[in-house]
Each structure stands twice: as C-alpha cells, then as structure tokens.
Image (tube, rainbow, N blue to C red):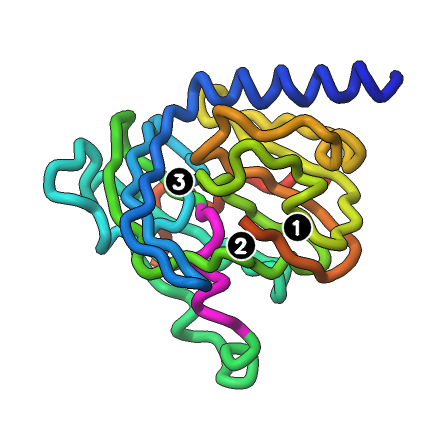
Amino acid sequence: MNRKIILSMSLVLLVELSIFVMASMTPFSTTADTTKYDVNIQLVEGWNLVPFFLPSTIKTNSEIQKGDIGAIWSWLPPLKDYYQVFPVNQLDNLPVEIGRTLDESEILSASVWVYSKKSGGIEYSTPEGILNSRTIYEGWNFVAITPDMVGKTFGELLNGCNILKGAEFTAYNNKWSTFSGESISSDSPLENDVGLTLVVKVDNECSIKGTSAIGGKPPVIPN
C-alpha cells in the first residue's frame, strides 16, 4: 500500500468520525500557557472519549447531567494504566511517592473515557486552564484536538515525537480504527476535527502544542 493510499484512508477516517462526533470548543480565557474552553459535544449511550471533562463542570442547561454519567476513567501515560476518577476517584488511593510523579494539569489536559447512560448533548466548561503545550509520554497518549490545532499538520504539532501508530474510537458503533505512524505524520492539515481524540503511541517522550461503576472498564487500546 503506497503512501497516497494510506493518507487517503486516514482522511476518510477523520471525516467519518467528525460526522458522529459533533463538537464545538470555544476558548473564553487564555494565558501564555493555558486556555479555558466551553465545550458542547454529542454523546452516545455507552463509552465516549471526551476532552478535558469533569462532572462538576457540567452546565445547568446541558441535556446530559451528572446523574446520566455512569463512570469516568482516565488513562495515565506515566503509569501506563486506566484509573477510575468517577464515581470513585482511584487517584486518591495512589501511594504518595507515585502521586508525586503525576502532574494534575497534564491529567486534566487529556481526553477521558465517559460512560453515558443515554445519548444526548453535553455542555461544560473545562475544569481549569488546559495546557497549550502538553507532554507526550512514551507509550499511549490520549490527545484531544483543540481549535488552535486546526490548519496544522501533526508533523507540526508533535515536536520530536517518533509516532509508532495511532487509533481513533468511534462511539456510535463501539469500534476502533487504527493506522500507521506514517499516516499521522502526514502533511494533511486538521480541519473539521475539533473535539475528536487521537490515541497515539510513541517510543520517546516529546510534546504537542497546540466503587464498581456502570459499564465496567473502558475499551482496551488496540495492540
């Protein structure tokens, strides 16, 4: 399969996913290092990848409310594992020496798995300023596409990252789409992709700019 075919397949995947992940992300406060967003995104019943979300930030006029959320899980790249953050926050039970290695701002600046009990729109504000430059750790990382990334390529955004592979999760049919690191590093700029989450696996640390819960554990990342 040549490079043009690989790139075409990747573009089709992004277009297909953007149809089902209707989202808007509006910045309302910006500093040199962080940005706060108002987010509106459509959820399906079941598992969804949602950027920068905590249930305490849901707006009163949102169709989906806190009572509609069954569980939230976060992938922590430094620990290479999932941790539940709602309804029980497993991070509170981490040993102190491990907790000290985690950066709360980095955790909040990634997408999380949200299990919704019903389909509908959810509106919320980000819990705090989202880092404009985020660390990409060796292994898997959940990267949310923000408005400042539009018009740029991943080659421009992923500084010094050696990307091995990538994956995107389509909530409406509960399936992963996977593709090579070469296709992610292509020169095709991001367009209608705000709110989508790209799960990338890298083999070096780099950076990017720009109680039992309902549903069990979130979907396993592809090998």
Residue 30 sits inside the magenta stretch:
no
Name the residue carrying label 3: 215
| Residue range highlighted in magenta | 102-112
Image-quadrant location for residue 50: top left
Please provide percent x and percent y for residue 166: 69, 37
The answer to whether 20 is drawn above or below residue 54 in the figure is above
Question: Which of the image's four quarters has the C terminus?
Answer: top right
Callout 3 environment at 10 Å: few (<14), some (14 to 19), or many (20+)? some
Q: Kindly identify the residue that appears in the image at 48 percent across and 22 percent down.
A: 18
Q: Kindly identify the residue that appears in the image at 54 percent across and 48 percent down.
A: 210
Identity of the residue furthest to the right in this view: 2
Name the residue carrying label 1: 140
Q: Left or right: where does residue 65 sit relative to residue 43?
A: left
What amino acid is found at the position of numbered circle 1 in the picture?
A: Trp
Q: Kindly identify the residue that appears in the image at 55 percent across and 85 percent down.
A: 97
Name the residue carrying label 2: 75
- Tag 3 secondary structure: loop
Please provide percent x and percent y for residue 181: 77, 37
The answer to whether 121 is drawn above or below residue 29 in the figure is above
What amino acid is found at the position of numbered circle 2 in the picture?
A: Trp
Identity of the residue furthest to the left in this view: 60
